Amino acid sequence: MTIQEKADALFEEQKVTWPLMQANWDKLDGVRLKQFEFDGFTIRIQCNPRRIVSSAAKLDRASIESRRCFLCMENRDEEQNNVWFGEDYEILCNPFPIFREHFTISRTSHTPQVIEPEFPEFLEISRKLPRLVVFYNAPACGASAPDHMHFQAGNLGLMSLDSELDELKKRYGKSLTDSSEISITAVEDGLRRFIVMESTTEEPLKKAFSSLFGFLKELQGQEPMINMLSYYRDKWQIVLFPRDKHRPWQYFEEGEKNILLSPAAVDMGGTLITPLEKDFEKITSEDIRDIFSQVSFSAPHFKLLIDFIQSEL
């Protein structure tokens, strides 16, 4: 069996043998969806009450250090099984799914969420799971377990970017490099600013990512705030969302102005996750524009990034 087939089989088994996952997966039938049309693309809203655990997670150091790590083997439910991915990673079913098929790919050791040394694994996991989109959330912008290195993966079709990426590149993209080894495109669609790296081989992607990561780390002075998506369809398409902010001001407001929305990779990919029905009901296209304007890379920062790519890669 391929890794993809083993993961699919694990998911089907866990829906039956793991009560927590079964209950939350069944509740996906009641998840509410709506969408907003922008200029040539779609932003979807998913009302998913079970995701309150992630959206409202306290991520300060004291809170992280005071709780048991739910990705460490000794702290998991006894019903939770896995599929090994080499010696260093294991594929687990996510018990609070957004997707119809939702996995967490977790490092076997309790090491911090730091992407640079793990980027080759990110590529390999994506290649071995071609029916899924694999994604990464940095510790300061979406990872609910910033103390334990992990990726996630979900079935194609939930995020609007899954089907809209190529059209967005044509409509809003600026080609930064297009060698025989790698293509890099900058996209500004009016809501988001992101970089798309495409190649049929790993080495050019590793080299480009290492350079981009170094630039972002120097610019932000810390582990860079990024979300990433990876698609493998005869070649890799890596979508890198550099971020300026973790959560918008609406997240911290009280009363009517509050919107409990904590954007991460899935949200940047075009499906905003709202655990509270009140937010699902009231959110508007203007709210969406405002939220993305806060959390996305600023125009000046994006220009610096584009200039760096054009001069160095």
Image (tube, rainbow, N blue to C red):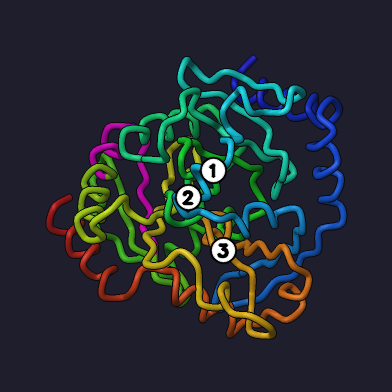
Decide which of tag 1 and tag 3 comes sooner along the chain.
1
Residue count near mark 2 (Cα–Cα under 10 Å), binned few <14, some 14–19, many ≥20: few
- Residue 257 percent coordinates (x, y): 63, 84
Q: Residue at x 66, y 42 (%)?
A: 155
- Residue 45 percent coordinates (x, y): 69, 67
Q: Quadrant of the N terminus?
A: top right
Q: Is residue 198 magenta?
A: yes
The segment highlighted magenta reads 194-208
- Residue to which mark 2 is pinned: 62
Q: Are marks 1 and 2 in contact (CB under 8 Å)?
A: yes
* Marks 2 and 3, how far apart at CA: 20 Å
- Tell me which amino acid carries mark 1: Ser
* Marks 1 and 2, how far apart at CA: 6 Å
Q: Residue at x 59, y 81 (%)?
A: 287
Q: Residue at x 77, y 77 (%)?
A: 281
- Residue 100 percent coordinates (x, y): 75, 44
Secondary structure of the residue carrying tag 1 is helix
| As drawn, 275 above or below 114 | below
Of the two numbered discs 2 and 3 in the rendering, the one whose residue sits closer to the viewer: 2
| As drawn, 191 above or below 165 | below
In this rendering, position of residue 256 left or right of residue 109? right
- Residue to which mark 3 is pinned: 262
Location of residue 274 by image quarter: bottom right
Secondary structure of the residue carrying tag 3 is loop
Residue count near mark 3 (Cα–Cα under 10 Å), binned few <14, some 14–19, many ≥20: many
Secondary structure of the residue carrying tag 2 is helix
Q: Is residue 26 magenta?
A: no
- Residue to which mark 1 is pinned: 66
Decide which of tag 2 and tag 3 comes sooner along the chain.
2
* Marks 1 and 3, how far apart at CA: 22 Å
Residue count near mark 1 (Cα–Cα under 10 Å), binned few <14, some 14–19, many ≥20: few
